[in-house]
Amino acid sequence: MGVTLATILIVDDSSSVRKVVRTLFEAEKGFTISGEAVNGLDAIAKTEELQPDLIVLDLSMPIMNGLEAADVLKSRWPEIPIYILTAHGGPEVDRAAQTAGIDAVFAKDKDMPRLIANARAAFPGKSKSSKSAKSAKSGKRSKTTKTSRSPKPNSATKPPKRG
């Protein structure tokens, strides 16, 4: 089994966009797609279940948009970076994303290579062994999942999983 740098949750209401993002990350060594979601509410549920290392979130979605979802996600899992994908970029979106705690904003039409580069830079040399991957699925983060960019709190600081 290869070294996993990061597990990724892809959130977009468009199956074709999810497929493109999945294909880009799967072409890169070290990234594993842990799951996909179709709207903000689904993203919250999948984050609770999968505990991804990175969330790639569409801005415009039905039911709950990316900014609304990011607000909830960052309040519950502040250590998980969130990257917004949008077809509607601009200074207003950048300001709103910054206010919501979004780590980066990428245009769907031109920033996909930059999305991958930023993800790689966010997780340099971080590795999960099979053992730590299993503990991550159970809601526990091992010491090997910390990155050099910022420490992640241990599982005791996360909200308890609901059964």
Image (tube, rainbow, N blue to C red):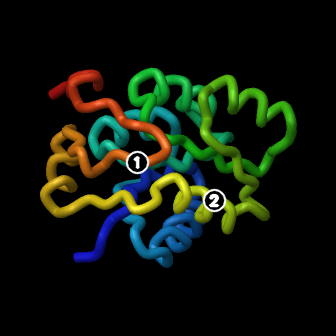
Q: Quadrant of residue 158?
A: top left
Q: Position of residue 73 (x, y in %)?
A: 46, 30
Q: Position of residue 18 (x, y in %)?
A: 54, 61
| Residue 59 - label | none
In front here: 46 or 103?
Answer: 103
Which one is in front in this view, the residue at disc 1 or the one at disc 2? 1
Establish if 47 lies above or below 113: above
In front here: 26 or 146?
Answer: 146
- Mark 2 sits on what residue? 115
Seen in the image, is 118 located left or right of residue 110?
Answer: left
Seen in the image, is 92 located left or right of residue 133?
Answer: right
Tell me the crowding category of disc 2: few under 14, some 14 to 19, or many 20 or more residues within 10 angstroms, Cα based: many
Residue type at mark 1?
Thr
- Mark 1 sits on what residue? 147
Quadrant for the C terminus, please: top left
In front here: 62 or 117?
Answer: 117
Judged from this view, the residue extending furthest toward the right is: 91
| Residue shown at 37% from the left, 57% from the top | 126
Mark 1 and mark 2: Cα distance apart in space: 18 Å
Residue type at mark 2?
Leu
SS of the residue at dot 2? helix
Q: Position of residue 7 (x, y in %)?
A: 37, 56
Tell me the crowding category of disc 1: few under 14, some 14 to 19, or many 20 or more residues within 10 angstroms, Cα based: some
| Residue shown at 31% from the left, 35% from the top | 48
Seen in the image, is 83 located left or right of residue 125?
Answer: right
